[in-house]
Image: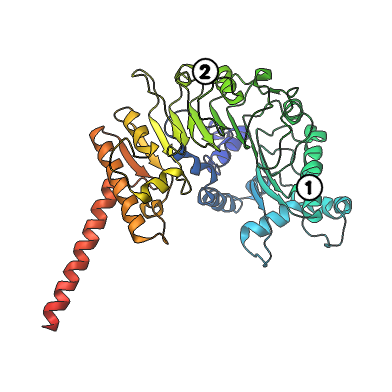
Amino acid sequence: MSDSRSILPGEIWYQILLCAIDAPWVLDTTVPAEGCFWHQQDKYHNEATYNLAEIYRRNIRLVCRAWRDFADEHRFRWITWDPKPIEDTSRRTRDAEEALGVHAPPCLSPGGWAVAASRSMRRTAARPLRILISVKNNRDLGILRDAVYFSFGKLTTLFINCRANYGTPIFDLLIQNSPLLPCVRCLMLKHLDFTGTPLAYISTAFPKLTGMTLEGGTFPHNPEDYLILPQAESLYFDFETMDGMTCSNWRVPSLLRLSVPILWNDNGQEDAEVFTCLRLHGSNLRFLHVNYAENVKLPPSIWKWCPKVTEIVTSFSVVSLPPIPSDHPVQYFVHIINHDAPSHELMASGWTSHKEAPKLLGNVERMPKGALLVVGVQTWGACWGGEMHLLRRATIQAFWSLINETCVTKDIRLENESKQTYQEYLQEKTQSLNLSMGGLSLEARSSA
């Protein structure tokens, strides 16, 4: 007779199995505030992590009938629907087709997809947690509509990319059917053309969002619009300007990460709407991304508005940092390469002193000792491009060597996205050159 004390309750087994098939990071909807976010962000899009969790899930379903039912209940947790012109037979595409019920004939109208797809979706009994869907035609719009109706009840992360003419019906679909999406916490909408008061609609429809990205498309900049998201930790606005918004109407007390545009601001005026946003909502920020910047001088008050920010991402070739107080915690700086920046033209024409050097060098000199400077390229060679004239390339390489020397004197770690430091790159380049010279010497001796 078995000892009943060794039998775990079903609820405990359920939690154990959930841990066994967990896909760390990729299915999460919150992000730790510690460390360099720029290096961490790829973990949230790592398909290898999810694929490994899927291997465990498929193995679990072979144990017994009960475990098979559990495993099948958790199929299709991460779905990507982005059809290509050529036929795609990969597992991810097949999973997306089955999860979304893509079995109806292509001649059906968007409204006709419900009848054709509902049986398939109900048969799969799958409830995705994360989905990226591209809407390029009526067929894709119908797939999205039916998925909202039948299979998004547990969805936590929704990414939608669309062509401009589908933006309005997509936004109306989400807002009108938000009760069918009670678990959505991360929402990213790309290339939607908004009208009216979209932030107010989102605030009402999805009040529990922890992250929101609005990228591309057009934005009405309606001063009557408002944003109330008490749990929002991440907001990314990828538009050319925030002028016309009224950030004083926002309530985002949990905000940790913010991406905002600053365009054509030569004198650092503190009354610009984006600076109003930072002044009112920057007290808890840890991460600040400045995009669409041209010849921007951040105001000295930014350190007072954002007293806890530890990471700034921008093109430091065009954005000037004000002097940083010695007691401010900022320590991570991510430089986005801008090959069209005026600084590159200056480098190409030559420079002879720090006064004539590009803004990047001045920014590095203002960074605190012991900071981390990440350059947004995978390899250092990407800094000077593959088709660049040799003289221009040599000039830019010399400039980066000067940047590196400045970093060394300030104990600043200078690295790329692969975490290779510039010092390591130079050593690797020297070793490669020595090996090449050694090979030439051997070839010369053998030929003699």
What's the amino acid at mark 2?
Answer: Ser
Residue 123 horizontal side relative to residue 47, left or right? right
Residue closer to the observer: 299 or 250: 299
Asked if 443 appears above or below 125 in the picture, the reply is below
> What label sits on residue 166 in the rendered view?
1
The N terminus sits in image quarter? top right
Name the residue tied to disc 2.
Answer: 283
Q: Residues within 10 Å of mark 1 (few under 14, many from 20)?
A: some
Asked if 25 appears above or below 198 in the picture, the reply is below
Q: Residue furthest bottom?
A: 447
Residue 385 horizontal side relative to residue 108, left or right? left
Label 2: which secondary element: loop
Q: Quadrant of residue 183?
A: top right
- Report whether residue 254 is seen: no
Relative image position of residue 306 (x, y in whole percent): 48, 20
Q: Quadrant of residue 406?
A: top left
Q: Name which of mark 2 and mark 1 comes first in the sequence.
A: 1
The tally of labels here is: 2
What's the amino acid at mark 1?
Answer: Tyr
Relative image position of residue 389 (x, y in whole percent): 38, 60
Residue closer to the observer: 378 or 17: 378
